[in-house]
Amino acid sequence: MERMDNLKNVAEELFIRKQHRRKQLAAMPWPEKVKAIVQMQRMVYPIVKDRNKRACIWKIADD
């Protein structure tokens, strides 16, 4: 029973952290959000480029 209680506590903590992260992301200014998207594109592009011909990395001024 102790393991289940510990698992519940861990799950609750993860949920709280996820909510906090979402609030942080929502509060970011638009330019920072775009930079985050471009960073994700850089990470994913090598994986999806052969499957998706429309895959690209946006070119932005701070690039």
Image: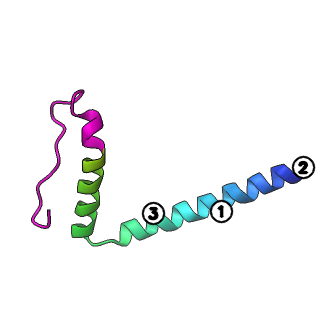
Determine which quarter of the picture holds residue 55.
top left
- What label sits on residue 22 in the rendered view? 3
Name the main secondary structure of what is drawn in magenta: loop
Seen at 67% across and 55% down, the residue is 11
Mark 2, residue position? 1
Q: Residues within 10 Å of mark 3 (few under 14, many from 20)?
A: few
Dot 2 amino acid type: Met
In the image, the segment drawn in magenta is 44-63
Way the structure is coloured: rainbow
Seen at 29% across and 60% down, the residue is 36
* 58 is within the stretch colored magenta: yes
Nearest-to-viewer mark from 1 and 3: 1
The image shows residue 59, relative to residue 24, as above or below, that is above
Nearest-to-viewer mark from 2 and 3: 2
Label 1 SS? helix
Mark 1, residue position? 13
Dot 1 amino acid type: Glu
Label 2 SS? loop
- Please state which of residues 51 and 23 is positioned toward the viewer in this rendering: 51
Determine which quarter of the picture holds residue 61.
bottom left
Seen at 53% across and 63% down, the residue is 19
State if disc 1 and disc 2 touch (CB < 8 Å).
Answer: no
Dot 3 amino acid type: Arg
Q: Whole-Å distance between the Cαs marked 2 and 1?
A: 19 Å
Lower sequence index among marks 2 and 3: 2
